[in-house]
Image (cartoon, grey):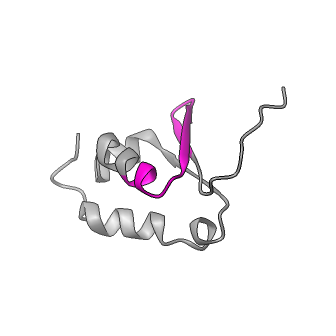
Amino acid sequence: MIRPDSALAPETWLHGVLSSKSVADGHVIRRKIRDIERFVGMDRFLEEIRLRGFRAIENRGYVIVICNQAPIRRLV
């Protein structure tokens, strides 16, 4: 749930995350689930990830976003 008392508007937070150099370069980013929920909401965040053709995984309270469309191969 988005907290109405958060310092950043959802659009501002999303823009900050998705305009980073790591995203532009096709690398990987991670964000805490609680921050995603606080600033923009999980559904909205994942929709933005889908629109860009990126993939996201969740582990131990984090969402890891692979900011490219290259194949993913699990090693272990």
The magenta-colored residue range is 48-64
Examine the rendered structure and indicate whether residue 74 appears above or below residue 43.
above
Residue 60 percent location from the top left of the image: 57, 29
Q: Residue at x 28, y 66 (%)?
A: 11
Residue at far top of view: 76
Examine the rendered structure and indicate whether residue 9 appears above or below residue 62.
below
Residue 45 percent location from the top left of the image: 37, 49
Left or right, 45 with reference to 3? right
Q: Quadrant of the N terminus?
A: top left
Residue 69 percent location from the top left of the image: 63, 53
Instruction: Compare residues 42 and 49 and report the one nearer the observer.
Output: 49
Q: Residue at x 63, y 67 (%)?
A: 22
Instruction: Compare residues 47 and 59 and report the one nearer the observer.
Output: 47
Q: Residue at x 54, y 51 (%)?
A: 54
Residue 44 percent location from the top left of the image: 30, 48
Q: Quadrant of the C terminus?
A: top right
